[in-house]
Image (cartoon, rainbow, N blue to C red):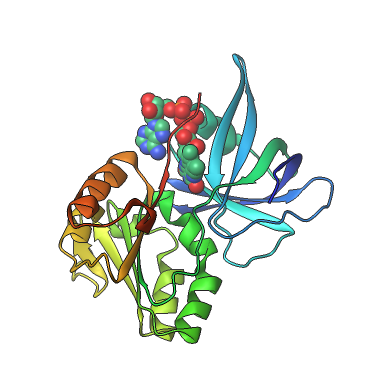
Amino acid sequence: MTHEHFELTLVNRRWVTPRVLELTFVRSDGQAFPYVPGQFVTLHLDTPDGEIRRSYSIASLTHDLGRIAIAVTRVEGGRATEILNRLAPKDRVRASGPFGRFVLREDTGMDYILAATGTGVSPYRAMLGQLEKRLSDTACEIRLLLGVRSPEELLYGEDFLALARRAPRFRFEACLSRSLSDPPAAHERRGYVQEVLKALPLDPARHIVYLCGNPDMIDASLEHLKGLGFALPAIRREKYLSSN
Ligand SMILES: Cc1cc2nc3c(=O)[nH]c(=O)nc-3n(C[C@H](O)[C@H](O)[C@H](O)COP(=O)(O)OP(=O)(O)OC[C@H]3O[C@@H](n4cnc5c(N)ncnc54)[C@H](O)[C@@H]3O)c2cc1C
């Protein structure tokens, strides 16, 4: 798929957790925006020091090519964060995309571990329709680990819990580094996502692992998986870093 440059118009904004703002855009020219769930879009933002480019995974729950949602973590002192926090409906931003190879592949006969920190869960939300179809068409098991600090930061948790209720071979686990609910909910685990991952019975012959979000989580998990004998193509990664 080739990528294009275009303009986006904001149609909706809502806080999905205390620190994550969801922005929904349409293309200003009314065209569709074809993408594969798991891909990201790059925003070209004007600052007093010139243009900065920041990438955001498409987080849309439905694969509607007419509109895309992104989930933006509030980064203290972050330049894009500040601009995106001020956006109001009808505001426009330049963008390019879609980019990225962090997408679901065929992988016949394999089970999946999908791990994320914070907004790193956005690609998995966009994949939910594909994941549900795979669960109904095959015998695969899918386990999603989402690392956040506390239960109120559980981004899109309801969407994943709803799939877990519909599909018994889908498991959703919230890895909470600071606090659990009182009493803890059945899907809550204490600790960082990489610690929960390390405690799982992982098997290179059986599992494909997706890792998305915080670079430290990805590096720590990658080392662990390599130590277990996982080949690099079975460890799919998307690191959230600023580009300039
Ligand atoms: C492929 C890709 C997909 C991405 N998808 C998303 C997404 O879906 N949602 C999302 O929120 N971000 C995503 N990011 C990160 C995003 O592009 C920006 O890096 C992020 O929004 C911070 O940009 P900023 O300009 O606000 O902060 P900057 O001005 O770049 O950084 C300010 C300071 O904060 C630090 N910092 C940067 N990011 C973080 C962070 N996440 N947590 C803590 N400190 C940080 C920097 O090191 C710097 O010290 C993605 C990055 C990539 C490469």
Going by the image, does 13 lie left or right of 209?
right
- Residue drawn at (33%, 40%) of the image: 215
Q: Is residue 162 above or below residue 36?
A: below
Q: Is residue 54 left or right of residue 180?
A: right
Task: Identify which residue, 17 or 188, lies in the foreground.
Answer: 188
Q: Is residue 125 left or right of residue 211?
A: right
User: Relative to 149, is 108 above or below?
Assistant: below
Percent position (x, y) of residue 232?
Answer: 34, 51
**Measuring 45% from the left and 62% from the top, which residue is drawn there?**
156
Q: Report the residue at 39% width, 77% height from top.
A: 109
Q: Residue at x 46, y 48 (%)?
A: 20
Q: Position of residue 204 (x, y in %)?
A: 26, 64
Extreme residue in the top direction? 49
Does residue 72 appear in the picture of this structure? no
Residue 160 makes an appearance in the image? yes
Picture coordinates of residue 3, whole percent (x, y):
69, 44
- Outermost residue on the left side: it is 199
Left or right: 241 as drawn, with respect to 225: right
Q: Quadrant of ligand 1?
A: top left
Question: Which of 38/209 is in front?
Answer: 209
The percent coordinates of residue 185 (x first, y second) are: 24, 72
Q: How many marks?
A: 0
